[in-house]
Amino acid sequence: MLEINDLWVDVNGEQVLKGVNLTIPSGETHILFGKNGSGKSSLLMTIMGFRRYKVRQGRLSFKGQDITTMPIDQRAKMGIGLAFQRPPSIRGVKTRDVFNICNSNSVSCDELAGKFEFSGLMERELNVGFSGGEMKKSELLQLLLQDPELVMLDEPESGVDLENLEILGKAINKLLQKYLWRTRAKSGLVISHLGFILNYIEADAGYVLLDGSIHCRGNPRELFKGIQRHGYRECIQCQR
Amino acid sequence: MSEVRRNRAAQAKDKKAAFGTDVDLLQYQLLANHEGDPLDLEALTQEDRDKIFQSGVDLEEKGRAGTFLQADHRIVHCAVKQPGLEVLPMAQALEEYSWLEDYYWQAVDVDADKYTAQAELHFQNGYFIRALEGQRITTPIQACLYMKHENTAQNVHNIIIAEEGSELNIITGCATAPHLQSGIHIGISEFYVKRGAKLTFTMIHDWAEEVMVRPRSGIVVEEDGLFLSNYVCLKPVRSLQMYPTTRLTGPGAVARFHSILVAPPGCELDTGARVVLEASHTRAEIISRTITTGGVIKARGHLKGLKPDVKAHLECHGLILAEEGTIHAIPELEAHTAGAEMSHEAAVGKIAEEEIEYLMARGLTEEEAIATIVRGFLNVQIEGLPPELQAKVDQAIEESEMSML
């Protein structure tokens, strides 16, 4: 589904990704671990196509098509979706309007909002005065409406209280079709800091990103256990 | 009295205004009051009607408590449908009510500049609207000042009085005939909001590319009175300059100004509002949303707190959608007592790239994303505005969007 070859990326002249190689087959969900500033968000933003992230070298392909220079909206239309870690506030634009923009399957936005205890925020300006948890929920609901084939989540659990974590877990399951007995077609690339997300996602692989390049690949739960125990120090040494 | 006034005006007839491009008034023709055929509603072409309708005035008069329509210097229509309400041509009102002298040129100085002087020296009517004491006229009253003759000056004088405990909702549209290119509109408007009264004034301007506009307004709000002004100017105009002054004279008086302005290339908009909080426990709010697609905007605001326990806020947000556009926000706060609580917030610039890209990640093209953000920016829900008037404001914004983007 997604293939990244030798990806080098600059932001404002600063190198943030240094030769990243990554392949996510159809139906698999992969997790990205790494310290703050290691380049995790940069990788997701580059896959989405944000213009600040300048690809200096390498290639991105999605569903067999080269998307390295493709505009953001076309990537979105091809089936790439991103739940932002810190989405912008947009004054004057109602959450409902943005939900309607995302809605590709004529699902009832109100019904969905009701199901995830979000109805009260529909008429508010997008993200204006939202709590951290409300923003995360808004992001996930937008993705549910967009229904992308590649689901990218940037720290979906940070700033969320325990009660809402459960609700968000439910949304993420739905996004990644974890509940289906038939073969999953959705792929995921998820950034996690706290590892909570592992309880809600059946992840197939994990990586540790350090200083702009991938240092470690393996079973996500084992990786996380190692990080909890030894921090990222081990990963730096291990170079697996 | 009137002679003294005329002398003062005569002496100010060449006096430049404090702000805005100076206009040579001699280049415009002054239609004498007897010139031209009498006009009535039937004489208006469909094109005229459409233009008038776009500025918010419905000639079918459905859902309107009263209507006033003046084309150039002539009264076309003046009607009242509700008791407790008066709508009259100004000349007639001055004849009928000798007490009107106590209001005439009391909120605006006759010798403020050459424009006020011309309005006095070449008076061409205008409207007088008054709600009698305790009358709550919630259905909107509509007034339209329409310019039909090429290269003429329209000089009108309006007085609006909301007597004690009354309520008035006025929508005024100023517009020009479809083929008209140039002219000057000078409009003196004096508002008197008496004790406990509420006056909502919504003005939608739809001028032509070479038209100069110089409104001169003064507002006096007494104890517990509320003055709510909404101003929308989204169509091209050569130059518009206005800076109305409001005096809050009694405790509990409130004034709120909301304006939405768009300046296309070649257009100069120099507008703002000034509120003097002369009594304790008064409140004021000035909010503007401006967009330039190539024109020049000066967004002014001046709050002056003279007594303790006053509260006032000034907010100007400007979006620059074209490289050559200019927005100059000039907010002023002036407190003369420690008990004044005054604030301002101003932000001018282009649309944040981050917001555009965020919406693109949801599947919108760049143009669609910008249009969505601009629509949101202009979508000011004005507190206390009757739904019919909000609908008119929304409609005007919607119509302008296509041409703007």
Image (cartoon, rainbow, N blue to C red):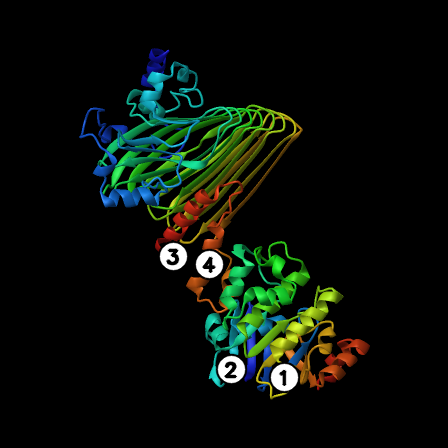
Dot 3 and dot 1 within a common chain: no
Residue at horizontal 61 percent and vertical 76 percent from the top: A175
Measure the alpha-carbon separation of dots 4 and 1: 36 Å
Residue under circle 2?
A62
The kind of residue on which mark 2 rests is: Phe
Measure the alpha-carbon separation of dots 2 and 3: 33 Å
Which mark's residue is nearer the viewer, 2 or 1? 1
Q: Between residues B210 and A227, which one lies in front from this camera angle?
A: B210
The kind of residue on which mark 3 rests is: Leu
Measure the alpha-carbon separation of dots 2 and 4: 28 Å
Q: Is residue B333 left or right of residue A67?
A: right
Query: Quadrant of the image for the N terminus of chain B?
Result: top left
Q: Are marks 2 and 1 in contact (CB under 8 Å)?
A: no
Residue at horizontal 22 percent and vertical 35 percent from the top: B149
Q: Between residues B157 and B210, which one lies in front from this camera angle?
A: B157
The kind of residue on which mark 4 rests is: Thr
Element type at mark 4: helix
State which chain disc 4 sits on: B
Which mark's residue is nearer the viewer, 3 or 1? 1
Measure the alpha-carbon separation of dots 3 and 4: 11 Å
Report which quarter residue B114 is drawn in.
top left
Which mark's residue is nearer the viewer, 3 or 4? 4
Q: Position of residue B146 (x, y in %)?
A: 29, 36
Q: In this view, does B288 lie to the left or right of A88?
A: left
Residue under circle 1?
A180
Report which quarter residue B66 is drawn in.
top left
Residue under circle 3?
B405
Dot 2 and dot 3 within a common chain: no
Residue at horizontal 64 percent and vertical 79 percent from the top: A213
